[in-house]
Amino acid sequence: MDRNKQPIGVFDSGVGGLTVVNKLRMLLPHENIIYVGDTKRNPYGSRTPAEIVSYTRDILQYMTAQGVKLVAIGCNTVTAVAYDIVRPEVAYPLIGMSRGIATAREITTTKKIAVFATELTIANHSHKKIAAAVDPEIEIIEQACPALANLIERGILSGEEIMSPLRKYTAPILASGADTAIFGCTHFPFIQPLFEELCGDTIAFVDPAHEMALQTLDVLKKDNLLNEDAENGYLKLCFTAEPERGGKLAEHLIPANEFTVEKISFA
């Protein structure tokens, strides 16, 4: 196969990375995309670093067998824990999840930026480290949201079951004086309207998936790997458990007639 026509791989612990796929398709409509959601072993946020590295290797091995030309990691936890370890192990470009710091820095006027993320991403303090290197005056206020990703995976995108923990997570951020917040988990844009309902106009939200899509475009251009086909590319969604549920959640972002769904497993 012509290398330019080879697919882009995107993966996550579950459905969260579909928010990245959505941005990629907007920016790169002619690219073929294979998505892997490891729904059998999610959530990754409560796994050990060794487990996450092992799971990441499983998925990259699958992507390599599919003949991908690039892989974008649609998961902040994997990026924080495994990216530096696995990057030298693959022959194609591997793009880690953008942290959204550059975009948030452009928006904030108070230089107080909140980060909503999984416990493991918060424990890694990756947003704080990047912000300190970019602008030492930026204050990063971290907020772990342990319940949200699992609720979103279950398709609970409204109602008291998700609003109750969300109130608990947003209250300290509202009290902190932050005027900008980064979604440090790719699942969270699924419920951006709920965040906005609780925070009103006081906080602007940043979805780092847009930054990541731009970074992917830059790499494809630099390596002369853009798909020049006139037709739109295909989108194949692969899940390690409950593919029907994954497909239903995908329909919140992508029309059902624009993707196929299948179940996969790792040897």
Image (tube, rainbow, N blue to C red):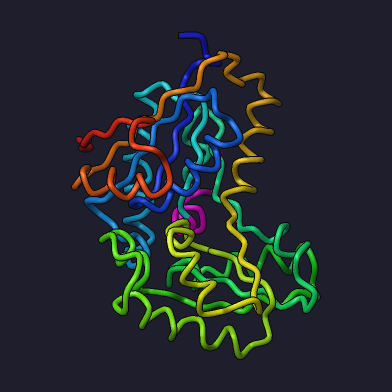
**Looking at the image, is 211 positioned above or below residue 2?**
below
Q: Residue at x 30, y 30 (%)?
A: 260
Q: Residue furthest top?
A: 1
Residue 204 position, x and y percent, is 65, 69
Q: Does the magenta portion include 204?
A: no
Q: Residue at x 65, y 40 (%)?
A: 215
Q: Residue furthest bottom?
A: 175
Q: Residue 235 sits in which quadrant? A: top left
Residue 46 position, x and y percent, is 33, 67
Residue 183 position, x and y percent, is 54, 64
Residue 65 position, x and y percent, is 34, 24
The stretch of residues the image draws in magenta is 76-83
Looking at the rendered image, the quarter that the C terminus falls into is: top left
Between 45 and 238, the one nearer to me in the picture? 238
Q: Does the magenta portion include 80?
A: yes
**Looking at the image, is 197 positioned above or below residue 210?**
below
